[in-house]
Amino acid sequence: MNGKFFNLMQTLGRSFMLPIALLPVAGLFLGIGATITGDAFVAQWGLENILGEGTILNGILSILTDVGDIIFGNLALLFAIAVSSSLANARKEVAALSAVIGYLVMYQSITSTLANFGDIETLKGINGLVGSVLGFEETLNTGVFGGIIIGLVVAYLHNKFYRVKFPDALSFFAGTHFVPIISTVAALIVGAILAFVWPFIGGGIAWLGETIAGSGPIGGFFYGYVYRALIPFGLHHVFYLPFWQTAMGGSIEVAGEVVNGAQNIVFAQLQNGDVISPEAAKYFSFAFPMMLVGFPAAALAMYHTAKPERKDDVKGLLFSSSLTSFLTGITEPIEFSILFASPVLYFGVNAVLAGLSVVIVQLLNIGVGFTFSAGFLDFFLYGMLPGNERTNWIILAIYSIIWGLVYYFLFRWAITKFDLKTPGREDDEEETRLRSKDEYREEHGIGQAAKTTTTSSTGELTEDELRSQQILEGLGGQDNLASFTNCATRLRVTVEDGEQVNQAQLRRTGAAGVTVSGKSVQVIYGTQVGGIATDLEDYINRVNKGEIQVTEATSKEAEVVVDEEPKATPAKEATEQTVEGIASPLTGRVVALTDVPDAAFASEALGKGAAIEPTIGEVVSPVNGKVVTVFPTGHAIGLQTEAGAEILIHIGLDTVNLDGKGFNVLVDADEEVTVGQKLVEFDIDLIKEAGYSTITPVVVTNTANYNNVSASELETVNAGDELITIE
């Protein structure tokens, strides 16, 4: 199997575990709530006065049922989030958010495309293809595959673009801000394509499920054998998921609605009070005889065949692992010990018995399901509690005991016949212990992706990585870095010791200014700070993974590359002097920029200009030009004049922390504006009550392009009065 494909499948399988891990609690709520409030259960035990419809206990249990149902009903969205975030190289929260947006857009695109260009009535005739998904009525039900598809698309786009850079005028939309944008566009296209393609894919999946079901014992054996055989490779999650959650595992009408997927069918019938379908439940029932009795019986065979002097050593290990298998269905210690002792015993006996078990439970009409593993808790909840009439659990219990005897005698015979080195039979110098899947995979090189070790030589590190290295060193090294984030213009860093911060080195990385106050550090980069923060996080992640190895020598070598002051853009060589006036965007008291209680603005690191303490909560355009940047929180806006001057209006200080509360932006990026046009409305009282200053810096961020930028000497201004002069 191709190594890259194998590793991708393993990673994809691991990403499935996040939503799959929710299934036990969702199934617990659904199983308890649906079973105990079911008419059959209530009538059987004469509990109408306690659990009948309208009673308090019935209402409480109904809430449990609804909570469990909402998780099963939205698994596809959860898979989209899990896949995208698991496959994202960094900034996983951005990938997760983009996946949610992408999933919603994809389904809106599918629904709208079908409404305008499709034949929805014809598609309704295909069993289970059309339904309601997340509030979208009469749309295609792509199931978990839809979530996985959009998750993969978003993960690809995220890894490709989360570090993308744009010109300064568009820098706000670069990096992580670009990921949800491009994901939206891609989801629209994916949805439009699926509207036409999915009917064929969905029909193919349904046909495959019908074929497997129609193949009788052969199809059942195939499922059980392959499921068990893939466990050592970590690929079983990828295999069983389509059977559990799509039409590959069957389609049945329950309570007037078509339900796809074996697990969905079992829980829909459980909730509706129906007899559980053995055809759907076989994908789960087959495991109970193995987990409850089979593997503990194999452990007993190991104990009985252990060397006499080692029986005491192995007794506790085998007993505890057997109890784990019985109660929870987790079989790793026993199962991988079998695999280490003899792959033939594992693949030739254990996996074969799993395949036969699928065939047997279907022949016995057993209908016991589970959410995660086939331990006693699941057996009680989904077998015993619903009642023998619905699940046939008594026959399953009898069969499990018989299956345990088969396991015991087969394993005892094989261990003694072939002198297998199961726990307690090791060579004298070897320690008696059980084995784990990680040991097996490490020993056989399974899923161990080749690690790329990159030293920090100037020939191998990119320019962005060199800068990140210098930033980290300037902050005192990784051990001194507690946390960091960024706002519109600066890195906001918390360090362990502020005295270890090297301000001169940080300025060499392109920082316009650095402020240190105790453990709080602000490194001012301007509007490109979002990309710098992403680069730094990515660099730290690579160092932590061992993909970048930094030595003292290479660190010095890298320092030489960037050991020079950032070059400012030369001032315009004007053959004739030009003057441009910038009007005041606010009404209020003028504050000298050097008096602003924020070091980034007071040092003029972000550019020269002025500040205003407003008396009216309105920002109007100070120029004729266009909107370059609108920050999502509404607290800052960037403009560009017709002559090319770049203006930043930052409403209040540290108001990014309000997360948009109190701000109402009236324009969009790239929109043309004229002097006096209202741009933003804001609540002065709310800002003050939250403890923030309303002083609003107005700066020319490309000050270096001009010979002189001067502020008005007026003490107060009205919106529209001249505030700044550029020469």
Image (cartoon, rainbow, N blue to C red):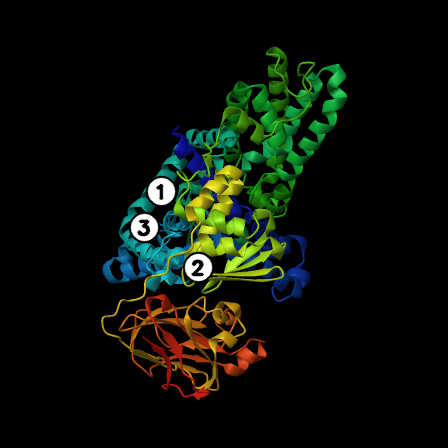
Image point (41%, 88%), residue name: 718
Q: Disc 3 residue type?
A: Ile
| Residue 79 shows in the view | no
Q: Foreground residue, 318 or 691? A: 691
* Residue 101, numbered circle: none
695 vs 161: above or below? below
Image location (x, y in percent) of residue 265: 47, 47
- Which quadrant is home to the C terminus? bottom left
Task: Please tell me in which quadrant of the rendered image residue 649 appears.
Answer: bottom left
Task: Please tell me in which quadrant of the rendered image residue 382 appears.
Answer: top right
Q: Give the mark toward the camera: 3 or 1.
A: 1
Secondary structure type for disc 2: helix
- Pointer 1: what residue? 205
Q: Disc 2 residue type?
A: Val
Q: Disc 1 residue type?
A: Ile
Task: Please tell me in which quadrant of the rendered image residue 256 appears.
Answer: bottom left
Exactly how many numbered labels are in the figure? 3
C-beta proximity under 8 Å, tags 3 and 1? no
315 vs 643: above or below? above
Q: What is the CA distance from the residue labelled 3 to the residue labelled 1?
A: 12 Å
Image location (x, y in percent) of residue 260: 42, 48
User: Which comes sooner in the sequence, label 2 or label 3?
Assistant: 3
- Pointer 2: what residue? 529
Secondary structure type for disc 1: helix
Image location (x, y in percent) of residue 518: 63, 61
- Pointer 3: what residue? 126
Image point (39%, 32%), residue name: 215
